[in-house]
């Protein structure tokens, strides 16, 4: 038997930042993960502006990261819109590209250097304040933090997730040895006027190559995730047709589940707190999750340091100010799945010459959840107006904060 103040299950960005902040505050922290680091992870390998600011706040600077700014969206008809990178009052005006294999290992090293202890084992159950391990032992802690991803065993063991309401997604990613200067989001139609329920991406990598992937939203119907692998080759050909990639050269593919929109999951109860993907803290509009994972880890650590007995209540209050965008837009993603023709029309409209010049800045802020903390501008004003319209529409349908069954 081992004893600690906090057991953090999962050593990805959410768990590592939780452990780092707790260890710096003097807590005895155990990080539990079945994997040995460095390890690969299906991801676009981009850290958004809020994540860049959080790393700076924690005095962490990922070595070898590549700084990126504007992003280009390509509509199904080939028209393009440049979404500008707009500096915020409390976040950076750029993103960082760095492979998850390296980034996650660096964060873990920082947590261990701060005093956290590593346990290489698999969690098989949860009994009160005890985490049962596959090796036959268990770990006893005052607080248990589930940072073990979208398919979190801690969330399941603590009965904190309702699969019928969760908003699921799946992403498949590969690498291509081809130079890319800007990140591209590709709104793609396998069949004309039938938008794929998600998007493809071609992002620059830190070493000068391309990270290419296809992500889709599946709602509560996880069996639909097979569409990512079924259509991946066809998407690669489309990206080549758009001049983004060579016709061949994609490497090994890696897939991963996403739990999005902060719906269908209770982020904390009793002595169990969920952070990152385990809590469903992925932007339902564009799938970003690293910044939210790290932010939730820092918030969980602060709640625990302020007092373990009330940590769950304190953490839930902190998350409520971080996840309004997620909850409002979760029904939007559900609607996008149900109405591919309408979304195809909207994609063409937003990238049309006259429209894109008027909306690109606001689109960039709203889509990337950067309205809060944005510098005063016409872009922020338009994004705030769009947010109010979406919130009013979801409230009128009685769907705010939950996915229709």
Image (tube, rainbow, N blue to C red):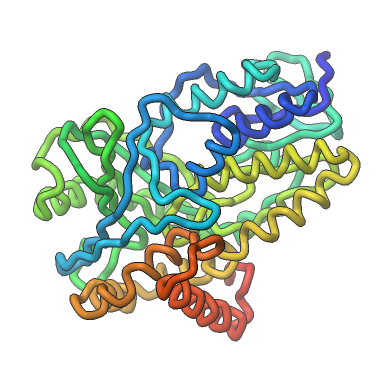
Farthest residue, direction right: 309
Q: Is residue 164 visible?
A: no
Q: Quadrant of the N terminus?
A: top right
Q: Is residue 358 visible?
A: yes
Quadrant housing residue 277: top right
Quadrant housing residue 321: bottom right
Q: Position of residue 394 (x, y in %)?
A: 56, 78
Closer-to-camera residue (77/161): 77
Q: Is residue 139 above or below residue 47?
A: above
Identify which residue is drawn at 44% across, 61% down: 285
Q: Position of residue 217 (x, y in %)?
A: 43, 58
Left or right of residue 112, residue 195 in this image: left
Closer-to-camera residue (45/64): 64
Q: Position of residue 395 (x, y in %)?
A: 61, 81
Marker count (numbered): 0
Quadrant housing residue 64: top left
Q: Quadrant of the C terminus?
A: bottom right
Q: Position of residue 87 (x, y in %)?
A: 43, 55
Left or right of residue 112, residue 370 in this image: left
Left or right of residue 398, residue 46 in this image: left
Closer-to-camera residue (2/63): 63
Farthest residue, direction bottom: 396
Identify which residue is drawn at 53% across, 29% down: 60
Identify which residue is drawn at 59% across, 27% down: 11
Identify which residue is drawn at 9% across, 42% down: 247
């Amino acid at each position: 038997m081992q004893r600690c103040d906090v057991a953090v299950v999962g050593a990805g960005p959410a768990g590592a930042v939780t452990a780092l902040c707790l260890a710096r505050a003097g807590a005895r922290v155990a990080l539990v993960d079945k994997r040995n680091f460095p390890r690969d992870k299906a991801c676009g390998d981009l850290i958004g502006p809020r994540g860049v600011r959080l790393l700076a706040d924690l005095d962490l600077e990922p070595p070898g990261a590549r700084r990126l700014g504007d992003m280009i969206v390509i509509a199904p008809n080939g028209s393009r819109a440049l979404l500008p990178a707009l500096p915020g009052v409390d976040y950076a005006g750029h993103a960082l590209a760095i492979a998850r294999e390296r980034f996650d290992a660096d964060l873990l090293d920082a947590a261990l250097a701060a005093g956290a202890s590593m346990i290489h084992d698999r969690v098989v159950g949860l009994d009160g304040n005890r985490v049962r391990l596959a090796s036959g032992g268990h770990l006893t802690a005052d607080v248990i933090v589930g940072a073990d991803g979208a398919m979190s065993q801690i969330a399941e063991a603590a009965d904190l997730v309702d699969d019928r309401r969760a908003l699921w997604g799946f992403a498949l990613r590969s690498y291509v040895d081809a130079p890319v200067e800007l990140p591209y989001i590709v709104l793609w139609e396998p069949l004309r006027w039938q938008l794929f329920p998600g998007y493809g991406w071609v992002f620059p990598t830190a070493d000068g190559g391309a990270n290419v992937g296809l992500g889709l939203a599946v709602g509560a119907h996880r069996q639909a995730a097979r569409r990512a692998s079924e259509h991946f080759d066809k998407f690669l050909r489309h990206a080549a047709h758009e001049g983004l990639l060579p016709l061949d050269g994609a490497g090994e593919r890696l897939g991963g589940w996403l739990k999005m929109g902060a719906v269908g999951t209770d982020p904390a109860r009793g002595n169990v707190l969920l952070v990152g993907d385990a809590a469903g803290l992925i932007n339902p509009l564009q799938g970003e999750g690293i910044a939210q994972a790290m932010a939730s880890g820092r918030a969980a650590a602060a709640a625990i340091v302020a007092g373990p007995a009330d940590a769950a209540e304190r953490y839930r209050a902190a998350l409520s100010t971080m996840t309004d965008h997620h909850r409002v837009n979760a029904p939007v993603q559900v609607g996008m799945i149900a109405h591919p023709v309408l979304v195809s029309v909207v994609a063409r409209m937003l990238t049309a010459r006259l429209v894109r010049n008027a909306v690109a800045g606001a689109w960039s802020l709203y889509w990337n959840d950067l309205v809060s903390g944005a510098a005063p501008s016409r872009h922020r004003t338009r994004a705030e107006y769009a947010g109010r319209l979406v919130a009013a529409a979801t409230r009128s349908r009685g769907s705010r904060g939950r996915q229709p069954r």
